């Protein structure tokens, strides 16, 4: 089963605690599995691909409040990605606040220079 190169498809829904369950099985019943080392490698590959998809989903944020869809993401994956996602969201908040501050300053400057309207069509129809 080859997992690399599948970054474009949707993140498949797995049980919410898939990673925890798989780790518990590998820790306590590895002797009962045919190729436990191969299973561990596949789990690492799967985890890397899913983490990359989650990071890629965060990259498309624009700061307009769209949010991030985390469909099919497990508990452990959310926990691991929380720091990264929080950093991105904080950065977007700062950008949004900066943009809002720039808009207010522009409006204040326009008022000081005698420009009173926002150019709305409703104002021009009277």
Image: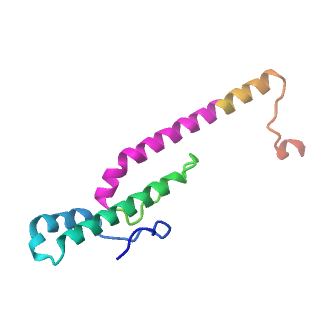
Left or right for 36, reference 121: left
Q: Residue at position x 79%, y 27% from top?
A: 110
Left or right for 32, reference 124: left
Left or right for 105, reference 51: right
From the top left corner, tell me how far across and down residue 92 is, in percent. 53, 41
Q: Is residue 68 above or below residue 90?
A: below
From the top left corner, tell me how far across and down residue 103 is, in percent. 68, 33
Magenta residue span: 74-101
Verify whether residue 103 appears in magenta. Answer: no
**Numbered circles on residues, count:** 0
Which of 8/5 is in front?
A: 5
Q: Is residue 59 above or below residue 38?
A: above
Q: Residue at position x 42%, y 47% from top?
A: 85
Q: Residue at position x 23%, y 71% from top?
A: 39
Which of 122/103 is in front?
A: 103
Quadrant where the N terminus lies? bottom left
Q: Residue at position x 26%, y 63% from top?
A: 19
Q: Is residue 18 above or below residue 102?
A: below
From the top left corner, tell me how far across and down residue 64 is, in percent. 58, 48
Q: Quadrant of residue 124?
A: top right
From the top left corner, tell me how far across and down residue 7 is, in percent. 46, 65
Q: Is residue 98 above or below residue 86?
A: above
Q: Quadrant of residue 108?
A: top right
Among all residues in the image, which is located at the extreme top? 112
Q: Colour scheme in the image? A: rainbow
Verify whether residue 95 appears in magenta. Answer: yes
Quadrant where the C terminus lies? top right
Magenta region's main secondary structure? helix
């Amino acid at each position: 089963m080859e997992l690399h190169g599948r970054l474009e498809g949707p993140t498949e829904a797995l049980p919410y605690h898939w990673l925890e369950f798989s780790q518990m099985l590998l820790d306590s019943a590895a002797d009962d599995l045919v190729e436990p080392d191969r299973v561990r490698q596949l789990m690492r590959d799967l985890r890397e691909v899913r983490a990359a998809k989650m990071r890629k989903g965060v990259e498309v944020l624009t700061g307009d409040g769209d949010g991030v869809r985390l469909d099919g993401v497990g508990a452990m994956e959310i926990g691991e990605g929380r720091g990264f996602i929080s950093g991105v969201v904080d950065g977007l908040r700062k950008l949004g606040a900066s943009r809002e501050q720039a808009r207010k300053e522009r409006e204040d400057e326009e008022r000081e220079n005698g420009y009173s309207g926002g150019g709305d069509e409703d104002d021009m129809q009277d």
